Amino acid sequence: MLGLIAKDLICIKKYSIKLLAVVAIYFVIFASSGDLIFLSSMIIIISTMLVITTFSYDELSKWDCFALSLPVTKKQIVLCKYFLALIFDLLGMLIVLIIHLIENQLEFEELISIYTLGAVALIIPAILLPLIYKFGVQKSRLWLILIFLLPTALAIIFGKAGISLGMGLPSESTIEALVKASLPAALIVFSASYFISCRIFENKNI
Amino acid sequence: MKNAIEINNLCKIYKDFQLKNVSFNVPSGSIVGFIGENGAGKTTTIKLILNEMKRDGGNIKIFGMDNIKDERKIKEQIGVVFDESYFHGEFKAGDVASILKKIYTNWDDTYFNKKLQEFNIPNNKIIKEYSKGMKMKLSIASALAHHPKLLILDEATSGLDPIVRREILDIFLDFIQDENHSILFSSHITNDLEKIADYIAFIHNGKIVFEHSKDELLYNYGIIKCGKNELSELDKNDIIRIKKDQLGCEALVADKDAAKRKYPNLLIDSTSIDEIMLLYVKGEKVC
């Protein structure tokens, strides 16, 4: 399992350095404006998405076929990807935390937003990973667009048609509850997603 | 242990292809050449041996252990080389070692580096810049560095020039010097197998056609070459397969010497694995 993680880290080493450079440039741009929310979201989402990049590299070199000739199980291969998604998410949160510290903007409100962002970002791999195991990286990107566009499109259509979904602005206590529940909920979805991926991968003809 | 690999009635059903009751063995201390045309089921069989996908029937024993129940224990003792390098192009040989040493409990770094030197594989180049021969040699070095007892090779010499192929065959011959070592070598380059294999297992349309000793095939099998009018002289029981074309007929027989005694007036040639394979695939049964 450590070998599999090492392989992914070596794979994305160069790519991550480039990404860090881009983040540094954006940091300079956004820090001067004082608005760190966009930058924070971007960093956390991009870092969580790094795990998707490892799948592209795997597909390119047909890694799975080789990996399964090694003394590792299919479950371990899947577990490695979920572990990395979690680590990258935490890493993204850490970078955002450091940026806020540098900018001297770390108050309770910012901590809450980093916490919520980290939780929400976990949902992306939780949805995408089973799709990747089922359909491969290329087709899954289309699925991702569909998954995110569909609710938005439906909301717009319903809105235009004048259908009220009974969703006004939520009250403060609802928001507070949602924020509190975001990480445990995301972790539950993330774990369920792991078991689904395992099942798909175990039945897959490599 | 008698057999390194024992495959019994292995089945796999796809929409457009079926592996049907495949059974053959890889005896310990031997090289078994696994031949068949493209799409005959060689890679599917190998993937099932490695438990890379679910089988629909049969069982596989490796070193006497079940290939699914004892998968990790077995894979610690197997080295696999595919038809291309499956390492990412940006990796260097050292990266491969640093990954695999965390996976195999008995990974031998010194041995790996020794093999790299022997094979002239540079440590500072990325794999993308390797020639195909270098990539294969790296795959072989990494398949050998945990001191496996069994090598599984899936078209490991295809696409290589004759010189590199010969070098690679020598590596395999060197590996088999230890009598506890065995090799399953899938290939459609039958020429390579004629050089190193002890047994040949032939798969066609998802079914094993035969498993024989290579010497028996090369020294006992023969081809009777005759005109269409001489065909009636032949005893149907002697003929395994027959192929007719405009120039005449070619009939495959299992005992060349007996055929020579029986048909002294006919031309009976020695044969090659290529010709045997061709006659089995393109020829017809007489009885």
Image (cartoon, coloured by chain):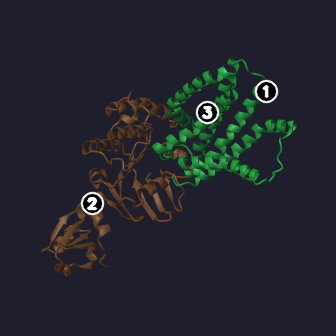
Chain colours: A green, B brown
Give the secondary structure at mark 3.
helix
The amino acid type of the residue labelled 1 equals Glu
Q: Which residue is mark 1?
A: A109
Q: Which residue is mark 2?
A: B274
Residue receiving disc 3: A47
Q: Position of residue A115 (x, y in %)?
A: 74, 31
Instruction: Tell whether label 2 touches label 3 (CB within 8 Å).
Output: no
- Residue at image point 50% right, 65% down: B15
Say whether mark 2 and mark 3 are on the same chain.
no
At mark 2, the secondary structure is helix
In the image, A34: left or right of A64? right
Q: Are marks 3 and 1 in contact (CB under 8 Å)?
A: no
Q: Mark 1 falls on what kind of element?
A: helix
Determine crowd level at label 2: few under 14, some 14-19, many 20+ residues with C-alpha closer than 10 A: some
Return the chain for callout 1: A
Left or right: A97 with respect to B260? right
